[in-house]
Amino acid sequence: MPHGDFSDYTAYGHLACGIASLVKPELWYASLGPIGPLLDGTPNPDALRCAKAAGVLLVWIGWVMYVVRWNTVNGPFAAGPACLGNAALALFVANGMDGGIQKLRFWHVYAALAILGALHFMFNPNPKWTPATLKKHEEERRKRKAAKK
């Protein structure tokens, strides 16, 4: 599971959104400069509880994206389509909020993150481990460890 590629940035985005939703769910109703809020109106206790529940799911998605080694099977066929589905839903919700008039909202920011993540998972997966590649990796690791001594 190499770290430092775009799957990590996708994970960080989900973790940040999830933690923010858990700690301060009122942010779903806040604008930031030209970017409109996720939800309009005034927050009520039920909506804030739903935002916290969504936060738990976002944290879970973030951890999964961080720890899974996205190879040529589970990247293009699991993570990629899931991210595209999330992006489509986010764009659908944003479109329905303003009567079809495109107003920049955090839904669009999330959709962009999900689309970029999907492109990474689908077209830049890590190679699958085979006995030969795993043996080569372990030998290189042993050499590096021996060189440090």
Image: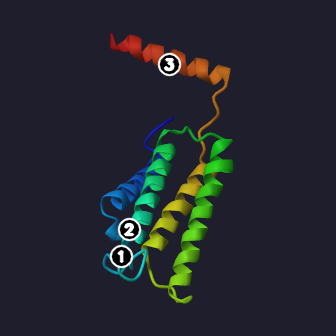
64, above or below 37, in the image: above
Residue 146's tag is: none
Name the residue: 47% across, 46% down: 5
Element carrying mark 2: helix
Name the residue: 62% across, 63% down: 85
Residue ID for mark 1 = 43
Comparing 45 with 85, the one in front is 45
Which of the two discs, 3 and 2, sits closer to the camera? 2
Q: In this view, does 124 lie to the left or right of 37?
A: right
100, above or below 79, in the image: below
**Visible in this render: residue 123?**
no
Disc 1: CA contacts within 10 A as few (<14), some (14-19) or many (>=20): some
Where residue 146 sits in the image (x, y, percent)?
40, 10
Residue ID for mark 2 = 48
- For marks 3 and 2 on the same chain, the one whose residue lies earlier in the sequence: 2
Residue ID for mark 3 = 140
Where residue 39 sits in the image (x, y, percent)?
42, 77
Where residue 119 sits in the image (x, y, percent)?
59, 57
Q: Is residue 6 left or right of residue 82?
A: left
Among the 4 quarters of the image, the one containing residue 17: bottom left
Q: In this view, does 11 lie to the left or right of 100?
A: left
Outermost residue on the front side: it is: 45
Amino acid of disc 3: Glu
Amino acid of disc 2: Leu
Quadrant occupied by the C terminus: top left
Comparing 6 with 98, the one in front is 98
Element carrying mark 3: helix
